[in-house]
Image (cartoon, helix red, strand yellow):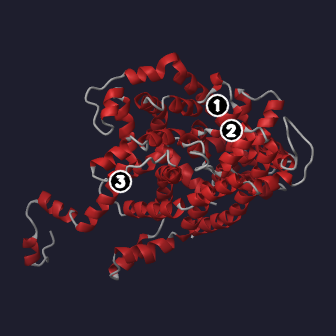
Amino acid sequence: MLRTSRFIPYLYLTPAALLLAFTFGYPLIAIFDFSTRRIRGASGPFIGLENYRQVLNDSVFHQAVAHNAHLLLAVPILLASGLLLAILLYERPRWWPLYRTILFLPYMLAVPLVGIVLSNMLQRNGIVNEMLRAIGLNMLALDWIGSAGLALWSVMGVIIWREMGFGMMLFLARLQSLNEEVTEAARIDGANWWQRVLFVTIPQLRGVIEFYVVISVITMLAWVFSYVYVMTRGGPGNATIVIEMYLYNFAFRNALPGIASAVAVILFLLTLGLTIPLFRLRAQAAEEDRA
Amino acid sequence: MNANLPFDKAIQRPANPAMRRALRLFSWSSALRQAVLIAACFLVLLPAYFMLATALKTPEAYSLSKFSFPTSPTLDNFNAALRGGRFVVWFLNSAILAISAVAVSLAVSALAAFAIARMRFRGATLFLGLNTALMVIPPVVMLIPLFLLLTNTRLIGSYAGAALVYAGLLTPFSVYLLVNFFRAIPHEVIESALIDGAAPFMILLRIVLPLSVPALVTLVVVNGLWVWNDLLIALILLPRDDLRTLMVGITVFGSRYNNDVPVAMAGMLLASLPMLLVYIFGQRYFIRGLIAGAVKG
């Protein structure tokens, strides 16, 4: 530790503190204030919890919440596919560095780009349907983006396509820091591949798996705006509206920042609630790492 | 070769080394493994193929077959996409924002992280705890007050306002990563500088930062890409057409050329080039940053 006079450290801290107060501190306090006012333009009269009442009674908001909940189905799929690919790569099959580079690529690409390319592929007369027809699956050649029943599944598929590489890389990094002797011992004891994966490898990855699940849950609840905005704008109708899109519509389409702030508060408390287990898991993962 | 090897085992081996290697490599389990990996790679690469093949097709060729290889490739789609220089403007806007936001956040984060990692003072733990908690809060939550604040201060639709917001959003991760990195620098290195009478700021500048180049490169890559790839903030804080970033630009572009897919794909291909370059040359740093942000500490 450096010895300095008492106020010097705060001098170093000030620029960051001011910047964080501007982007996080003020807005996070302001949304609570705004959410209790009827705002037209810059400010408005205090109306108590009226905005919250309106949001919680709005069937479109219920739909948005249900759609975010639906997207949670992507979490087990992401987890299983990420784990499978990481374990396969960890065994260092031939060309594994090439596979790793390719499989991580989607995560590097921007969401708008991915959304536009894949939406075009999923159009009614797009390449996906053309391929399905070519292999005789005509009944599966559907209107993936344009029909209300399928659009949310398509958005989910695109999210899985792009985010899969993240989990894979996370698990692979953890695997590479593990002690190989344990798996080797299980092999010598006659455990087959499935037994080694289920009873030796996965238990050792427990910390990072829990962490990944929490991170993915937060993603599905509060970080999917760009996918939805680019692919469907929440449509057709409200078939793919999510909480963030609902907030965006009220704030910047309908110019009702009071109501939108109530949604922001709800979203904030939701992520905050999920952050607590995240912190615990992060500390745990760090502990395992040191061990 | 081992002379004690049983004779019968020795003759079972194919004499030809290439043949022997092929036999050793082939097994049903490794074939299955390869099949799964190749299938996954196919799913990942199909959109890339679609983008490239479509960008080289005429609208007629595209409407005939989406999957086919472009037999008579054309560059017309790229000309159409580049017309009017809009892509260049979007590129520049994104670059200006990314560079300034990354620079600002790096400077303030390095100062704060240095104090937290290397000085003893009240509130250090509290600051770091709050800072870390901010990492998972989605920006959409802060957007309404920021929009109103920037509108009131006439900073809406300006590089400065948006860059400052981006810099702020990048700071929690940057502080967090740098604190971990600065703490790992052995204190003998710093002590020897202290004996030479260096002031704390000089220690940061001359010793700590040069030793932290890997962490700084990681931050530049990860944070730069974050700003470059963001849609939401640019969409709302930069509403003027001439200030559109690449992501806002391609979103508009993609819906405008909804019915002219080859031109849309040519545009997407152009837009993905910088990211691909960063990926090819910066993969190592990106992965390191990702893992550091997720697993450590």
**Residue B253 vertical position relative to residue B201 in the rendered view, above or below:** above
Badge 1 local density, few (<14 within 10 Å), some, or many (20+)?
A: many
Q: Are marks 1 and 2 in contact (CB under 8 Å)?
A: yes
* Front-most of residues A214 and B236: B236
Of all residues shown, which one is farthest toward the bottom? A189
| Lateral position of residue B33 relative to residue A285, left or right | left
Q: Quadrant of residue B13?
A: bottom left
Is B288 situated left or right of A57 in this image?
left
Quadrant in which the N terminus of chain A appears: bottom right
Which secondary structure lies at badge 3? helix
Give, as a three-letter code, the residue at label 2: Tyr
- Which residue is labeled 3 in the image? A139
The residue singled out by tag 2 in the image is B166
Q: Which residue is mark 1?
A: B97
Say if A71 sits above or below A129 in the image.
below
Is residue B195 visible to the viewer in this orientation of the structure?
no
Tag 1 secondary structure: helix
Q: CA distance from mark 3 to mark 2?
A: 46 Å
Residue A55, image x and y in percent? 77, 53
Which one is nearer the viewer's eye here, A188 or B93? B93
- The kind of residue tagged 3 is Met
Asked whether disc 3 touches disc 1, contact meaning CB atoms under 8 Å apart, the reply is no
To which chain does the residue with label 1 belong?
B
State which quarter of the image contains the C terminus of chain A: bottom right
